[in-house]
């Protein structure tokens, strides 16, 4: 006996919930949609949490993400033909990152050190015409390599939060500008997005192979930091360091006049 075909039936049920909620604002339908899509929150919270210190409670991230899911359900327009999961993941991630920014969990001393590292990297990249090694960067800053790598590890989440901001450092473009909106984008907006992708790809290609691979696997392939460590044969802590250094390097490269 073959298994029942639950997929299409379930899809029809969810479609009916969407139709009822959007047509009448039915709270029962809304609650069922929230419950149905709630696994997305755990998925996104897990991805974001992989780059955070252990002191950050995963349960808090899920709580922040639930607000993003509810916002996505309230604002989603099924008739536009977009896939809800793609739309919601961006909203959920945005809600989590916004809350982390508001909490400002990164110590002021670490933020100050981040600015110092970024300035030093910019100086060395201009002088060497390439991304400096950890040893070169530590020597330039007058600190042990171990201390530099420790700071880079702590900066991993700073890089994660800021990566989307790198898409257009000279404008007010935000993460929300890159997800589905209520209006069709203009030709100028489409061109700007395509140009942004081109510039970002060009900057990525100028990174050292290992650092480029870390960003590609994390942001485009969806691997966790631990999984990337297995691919590279290094510890998760080392991947955090490479991730932070790569993001700082990208920020420097995208701020150069040739990339504007």
Image (cartoon, rainbow, N blue to C red):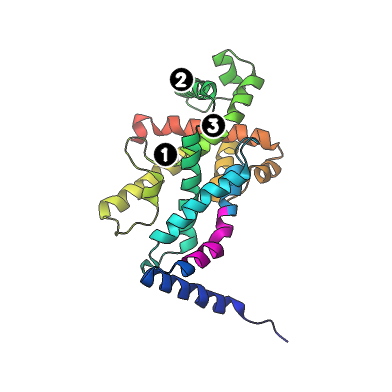
Viewer-side label of 1, 3: 3
Q: Residue furthest top?
A: 142
Viewer-side label of 2, 1: 1
Q: Is residue 223 magenta?
A: no
Q: Quadrant of the C terminus?
A: top left
Q: What stretch is highlighted in magenta?
A: 30-41
Q: Position of residue 58 (x, y in %)?
A: 62, 44
156 over 123 or under it: above or below: below
**Cα–Cα span, label 2 and label 1:** 22 Å
Rendered residue at 47%/69% (across/down): 29
Rendered residue at 60%/39% (across/down): 51
Q: Nearer the viewer, residue 166 or 84?
A: 84
Rendered residue at 46%/41% (across/down): 98
Q: Mark 2 points at which residue?
A: 123
Q: Name the residue under label 1.
A: 165
Crowd tier of the residue under label 1, counting other residues whose Cα lies within 10 Å: few below 14, some 14–19, many 20 or above: some
79 over 1 or under it: above or below: above
Magenta portion: prevailing SS class: helix
**Cα–Cα span, label 1 and label 3:** 19 Å
Q: Where is residue 148 in the image (x, y as percent from the top left)?
A: 61, 22
Crowd tier of the residue under label 2, counting other residues whose Cα lies within 10 Å: few below 14, some 14–19, many 20 or above: some
Q: Nearer the viewer, residue 173 or 63?
A: 63
On residue 119, which mark appears? none
Mark 3 falls on what kind of element?
loop
Specify the quadrant of the image occupied by residue 215: top right
Q: Mark 3 points at which residue?
A: 105
């Amino acid at each position: 006996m073959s298994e029942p075909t639950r997929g299409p039936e379930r899809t029809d049920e969810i479609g009916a919930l969407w139709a009822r909620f959007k047509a009448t604002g039915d709270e029962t339908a809304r609650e069922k949609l929230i419950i149905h899509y709630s696994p997305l929150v755990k998925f996104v919270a897990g991805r974001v949490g992989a780059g955070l210190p252990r002191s950050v409670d995963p349960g808090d991230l899920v709580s922040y993400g639930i607000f993003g899911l509810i916002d996505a359900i309230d604002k989603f327009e099924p008739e536009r033909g977009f896939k809800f999961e793609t739309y919601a993941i961006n909203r959920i991630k945005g809600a989590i990152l916004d809350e982390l920014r508001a909490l400002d969990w990164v110590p002021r001393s670490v933020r100050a050190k981040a600015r110092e590292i970024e300035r030093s990297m910019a100086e060395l990249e201009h002088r060497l015409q390439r991304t400096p090694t950890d040893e070169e960067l530590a020597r330039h800053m007058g600190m042990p390599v171990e201390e530099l790598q420790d700071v880079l590890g702590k900066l991993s989440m700073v890089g994660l939060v800021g990566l989307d901001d790198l898409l257009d450092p000279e404008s007010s473009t935000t993460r929300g500008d890159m997800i589905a909106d209520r209006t069709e984008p203009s030709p100028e907006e489409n061109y700007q997005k395509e140009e942004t992708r081109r510039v970002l790809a060009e900057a990525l290609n100028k990174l050292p192979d290992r650092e480029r691979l870390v960003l590609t696997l994390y942001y485009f392939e969806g691997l966790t930091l631990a999984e990337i460590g297995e691919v590279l044969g290094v510890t998760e802590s080392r991947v955090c360091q490479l991730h932070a250094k790569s993001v700082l390097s990208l920020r420097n490269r995208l701020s150069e006049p040739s990339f504007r």
